[in-house]
Image (tube, coloured by chain):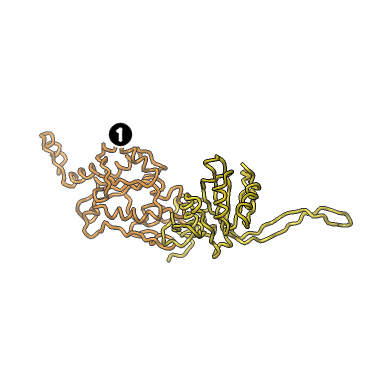
């Protein structure tokens, strides 16, 4: 639609908008996070949802105790290998459309406990992460920034076409394989469909 | 509080036939400990808990220690006749010590406000003679900590009411705090490798792709 005509119409009190924009505007302003925390980052997440930082300004104050009612998983804290299958299972139980924010050094990479025998080196080895936040723990402002980044990404999602959003593509499953407890490690150690190690240049 | 020597003498009267050794500690902490044979561990523990002088009613901590096979070197001076004259010569004596696992208990008395008294048990070796006596029947608080020692070091506590893994999952086979534990190779990618991690990451990259 012509921008000039749209502007002219809005002066007359007629607002025109694409369905895609309306749909995404509605979705991005009512993202309900799943209420679960794994470690100290959860304290910052709680602070973010309280009066001082007030995540309610972004329509995300309704932390849901059930994955069936949640749109967003905030992985707040260290994911141990023993906990990882449960986190993936919770993500599988969330209905589409669903998003993941990996909050803090541990959730994105293992953080200070990276070399621990029971620490997963980042939840992005098993589920697709939309926004990563570094920090140990990140400030509430950082979580709000991540949240606004996620809103922008939701806003950019396409409803049709080959690069449409995952939840609108009937051929793509929203479920991810849950790792099994092996004798020495989780099996498989990562999900190759969602996680590929960046190419590391060998030291010359 | 009594000295450890006094405690040892009284324990040997109270629980006859017990082998008790005092393990000195040369570090700044200077905390010697009592080494007890696992056959008499429960009797000794009961004595320490019920003794009216000590009343060690609280076991604050149970730890595991892994001692690998080691070669101990001892230096001592010997007088020798060299070139007709007597001289002091330093000689080095080497003894090899087989490895073992150790469980360490830190005991306090809430009633008498004293402690710690440190109790140790040692296994025969690191592979098949890894059985020790559980002290959970004496101090209930040892239950989870002995489970943790089993999980991470692989010491089997006889007489423990519920010896299962506590931090790792049930099907896990290794004991990760042992010094010869090899962690799984998940060093595919390290954003900021340094020191040991850099070595591991290089090792991984040098490996041919499967």
Spot occupied by residue A153 in the image (x, y as percentages of width and height): 27, 46
Q: Which chain is orange?
A: A
Choose between A67 and B51: the one closer to the eye. B51
Taking the spot 61% from the left edge, 46% from the top edge, the residue there is B31
Identify the residue at image location x=37%, y=40%: A43
Image quadrant occupied by the N terminus of chain B: top right
Residue A103 quadrant: top left
Instruction: Give residue B43's quadrant in the image.
Output: bottom right
Front residue of this view, candidates A51 and B172: B172
Q: Position of residue B122 (x, y in %)?
A: 58, 57
Element carrying mark 1:
loop
Q: Chain B is which colour?
A: yellow
Residue on which the image places disc 1: A51
Q: Is residue B70 above or below residue B119?
A: below
Give the total number of marks visible in the rendering.
1
Residue placed at 50% from the left, 50% from the top?
B139
Instruction: Evaluate whether residue B106 shows in this view.
Output: no
Judging depth in this view, the residue of B63 and B188 nearest the camera is: B63
Residue A173 drawn at (x, y percent): 25, 58
Name the subunit of mark 1: A
> Which residue is pictured at 28% across the width and 49% down the height?
A99
């Amino acid at each position: 639609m012509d921008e000039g005509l749209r502007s002219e119409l809005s002066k007359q009190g007629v607002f025109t908008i694409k369905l895609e924009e309306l749909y995404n505007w509605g979705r991005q302003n009512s993202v309900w996070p799943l209420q679960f925390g794994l470690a100290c980052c959860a304290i910052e997440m709680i602070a973010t949802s309280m009066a001082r930082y007030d995540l309610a300004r972004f329509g995300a104050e309704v932390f849901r105790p059930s994955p069936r009612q949640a749109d967003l998983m905030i992985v707040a804290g260290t994911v141990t290998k023993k906990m990882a299958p449960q986190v993936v299972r919770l993500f599988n139980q969330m209905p589409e459309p669903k998003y993941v924010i990996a909050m803090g050094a541990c959730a994105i990479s293992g953080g200070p406990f990276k070399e621990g025998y029971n620490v997963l080196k980042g939840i992005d080895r098993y589920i697709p992460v939309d926004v990563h936040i570094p920090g140990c723990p990140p400030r509430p402002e950082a979580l709000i920034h991540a949240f606004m980044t996620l809103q922008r990404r939701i806003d950019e999602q396409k409803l049709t076409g080959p690069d449409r959003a995952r939840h609108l593509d009937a051929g793509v499953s929203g479920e991810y394989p849950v790792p099994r407890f092996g004798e020495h490690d989780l099996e498989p150690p990562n999900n190759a469909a969602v996680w590929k190690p960046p190419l590391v240049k060998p030291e010359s | 509080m009594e000295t450890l020597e006094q405690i040892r003498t009284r324990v040997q009267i109270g629980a006859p036939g017990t082998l008790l050794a005092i393990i000195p500690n040369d570090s700044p902490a200077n905390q010697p400990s009592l080494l007890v044979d696992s056959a008499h561990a429960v009797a000794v523990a009961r004595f320490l808990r019920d003794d009216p002088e000590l009343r060690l009613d609280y076991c604050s901590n149970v730890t595991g220690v892994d001692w690998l096979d080691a070669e101990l070197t001892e230096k001592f001076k010997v007088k020798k006749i060299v070139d007709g004259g007597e001289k002091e010569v330093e000689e080095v004596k080497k003894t090899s010590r087989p490895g073992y696992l150790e469980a360490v208990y830190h005991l306090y008395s809430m009633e008498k406000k004293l402690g710690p008294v440190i109790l140790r048990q040692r296994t025969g070796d690191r592979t098949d003679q890894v059985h020790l006596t559980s002290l959970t029947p004496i101090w209930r608080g040892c239950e989870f900590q002995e489970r943790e020692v089993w999980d991470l070091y692989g010491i089997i506590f006889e007489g423990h009411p519920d010896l299962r893994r506590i931090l790792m999952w049930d099907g896990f086979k290794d004991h990760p705090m042992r010094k010869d534990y090899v962690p799984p190779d998940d060093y595919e990618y390290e954003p900021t490798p340094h020191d040991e991690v850099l070595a591991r990451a290089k090792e991984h990259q040098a490996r041919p792709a499967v």
